[in-house]
Image: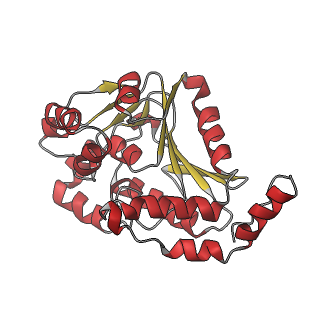
Amino acid sequence: MTYKLITVEKTDHLTIVTLNRPETMNAISPPVSTEISAAFDDFAADQDAWVCIVTGAGDRAFSAGNDLKYQAQHGGEAVAQETAKVKGGFGGITFRYDCFKPVIAAVNGFALGGGFEVALACDIIIAADHATFGFPEPRVGMIAGAMGVHRLPRQIPYHLAMGMLLSSKRISAQEAMQYGLVNEVVPMQDLMATARKWAAEIMMGSPIAIQASKEAALKGLAYPLEEVPRLFPIQEVMYGSEDFIEGPKAFAEKRPPQWKGR
């Protein structure tokens, strides 16, 4: 697919997806969601792609969320119908539950509304020190319907989450760090280097074991602890993989493992 609204960079098992609409503060319209979803289809299918970083172009915004100008022009019903056709839903990732490869959000400014929802759909969030998070949807007659109203109360204490959802209160990167919403806050000039560092640290592990860890953690949330299934499908793949042999072998030979991802 030819991308017009995002860019995709692939190097050394790392995929970087960048929302490339700085003139709109990287607002997300259905065409943007379509492109991101296609990029994640490719990322999920590519055996050589192990980790993804999602970010926004420029230094003002990760994403200001739903493209309200596009919605005003085309109508809310048309936008909803267009978005419903996108496999990953709004932002191409907020309704994606079949990719267990790690995804890192590098938040380079405003992460509002749908932009915040995209960040919440990632596994790790690195924020520039000027980043801002919030759900302004009620003030334009909407809700954070791309899983924001569901993910936020699952990721921070209930009253903190409801305070943000109901009042449209914005919080700083530093407050988000205190809430446990982000993993690290760094100066803007260090943002991508820090996200790449996290990706490199993740890739020190076997990609199959990393994916098995994510799958087990996410699927296990749906069960009481005593009922969590011991095995998930990818764990069985892990036990039969070359990496399952390579890890102990490298340890015994006192050398870095050479992961194959298979």
Left or right: 233 as drawn, with respect to 239: left
- From this viewpoint, is residue 214 visible? yes
The answer to which of 235 and 12 lies nearer the viewer is 235
At horizontal 27% and vertical 53% (from top left) the residue drawn is 146
Which residue occupies the extreme left position in the image?
A: 141
Question: Measured along the vertical axis of the image, is residue 200 above or below residue 107?
Answer: below
At horizontal 33% and vertical 56% (from top left) the residue drawn is 90
At horizontal 50% and vertical 76% (from top left) the residue drawn is 233
Question: Measured along the vertical axis of the image, is residue 41 above or below residue 60?
Answer: below
The answer to which of 168 and 235 lies nearer the viewer is 235
| Residue 74 in picture, x, y percent from top left | 22, 54
Residue 93 sits in quarter: bottom left
The answer to which of 48 and 205 lies nearer the viewer is 205
At horizontal 46% and vertical 71% (from top left) the residue drawn is 230
Instruction: Please state, as top left, top right, bottom left or bottom right, where the N terminus lies in the image.
Output: bottom right
Instruction: Please state, as top left, top right, bottom left or bottom right, where the C terminus lies in the image.
Output: bottom right
Left or right: 204 as drawn, with respect to 158: right
Left or right: 6 as drawn, with respect to 48: left
| Residue 49 in picture, x, y percent from top left | 64, 60
Q: How many marks?
A: 0
Question: Measured along the vertical axis of the image, is residue 213 above or below residue 132?
Answer: below
| Residue 135 in picture, x, y percent from top left | 24, 37
